[in-house]
Image: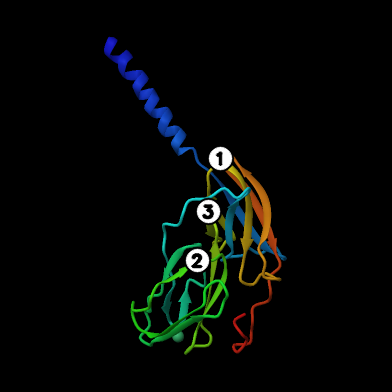
């Protein structure tokens, strides 16, 4: 049995190492409105509590146009990330933002000819189209790589290394416009949190300003 006794400790060491590297932690978050109805398209993110630097962005986003609508309605990206704007309509769009974190004006374009935009500053950017007044989309730029968006059931799971964070949640229709927050501590495994949002009633006026 001398061979086995040589192999086993090595195999055990490899197993322990990969187990430590894969130790997962994260949080699942549920968001409901004042009536207990699930809130979809809410942005949820974890900011480091204590200001330690977090990994830099690696993922670009995409907001396409189809049927005279932006898709998706709400996008969350890490500050420093790019967004591409492919136009899948037969008509041209002219997209713009007047929002402080990133102002831009992408004049009439078709297909994939729009310049990607880099969103460097955290905050909220509202997108519109100069030709089609009803087109609207929201970009929430966050200072962390740990984020997600609630599904139709109001749920989202966000993975992040163990540690102390400020958990924030935001939606374009949240009353007052500011994210709600709570302190959380993540360790191995999945934590749970929930928020109750007060939301503005959906606008019925097609000529209402975007923000
Ligand atoms: Cu348009």
Calculate the distance from the C-alpha at mark 3 to the C-alpha at mark 1: 16 Å
Residue 80 on image: x %, y %: 47, 63
Residue 101 on image: x %, y %: 55, 71
Label located before the other in sequence (3 or 2): 2
Q: Residue at x 48, y 51 (%)?
A: 55
Residue 7 on image: x %, y %: 31, 19
Which residue corresponds to mark 2?
120
| Quadrant assignment for the N terminus | top left
Q: Nearer the viewer, residue 194 or 37?
A: 194
Q: Nearer the viewer, residue 165 or 205?
A: 165
Which residue corresponds to mark 3?
146
Q: Is residue 89 left or right of residue 152?
A: left
Q: Residue at x 41, y 79 (%)?
A: 66
Which residue corresponds to mark 1?
189
Label located before the other in sequence (1 or 2): 2
Element type at marker 2? loop
Label located before the other in sequence (3 or 1): 3
Q: Residue at x 27, y 13 (%)?
A: 3
Nearer to us: label 1 or label 2: 2
Q: Residue furthest left?
A: 3
């Amino acid at each position: 049995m001398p061979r086995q006794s040589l192999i086993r400790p090595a195999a055990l060491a490899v197993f322990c190492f990969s187990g430590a590297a894969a130790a997962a932690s994260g949080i699942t978050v549920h968001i409901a409105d004042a009536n207990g109805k699930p809130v979809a398209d809410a942005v949820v993110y974890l900011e480091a509590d204590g200001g330690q630097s977090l990994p830099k962005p690696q993922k670009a986003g995409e907001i396409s146009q189809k049927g005279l609508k932006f898709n998706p309605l709400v996008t969350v990206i890490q500050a420093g990330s790019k967004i591409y704007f492919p136009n899948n309509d037969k008509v041209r769009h002219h997209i713009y933002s007047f929002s402080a974190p990133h102002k831009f004006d992408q004049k009439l374009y078709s297909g994939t000819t729009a310049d990607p935009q880099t969103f460097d500053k955290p905050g909220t950017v509202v997108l519109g189209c100069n030709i089609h007044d009803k087109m609207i989309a929201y970009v929430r730029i966050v200072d962390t790589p740990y984020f997600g968006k609630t599904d139709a059931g109001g749920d989202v799971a966000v993975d992040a290394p163990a540690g102390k964070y400020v958990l924030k949640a935001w939606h374009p229709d949240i009353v007052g416009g500011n994210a709600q927050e709570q302190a959380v501590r993540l360790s191995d495994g999945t934590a749970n949190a929930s928020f109750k949002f007060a939301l503005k009633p959906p606008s019925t006026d097609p000529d209402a300003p975007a923000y």
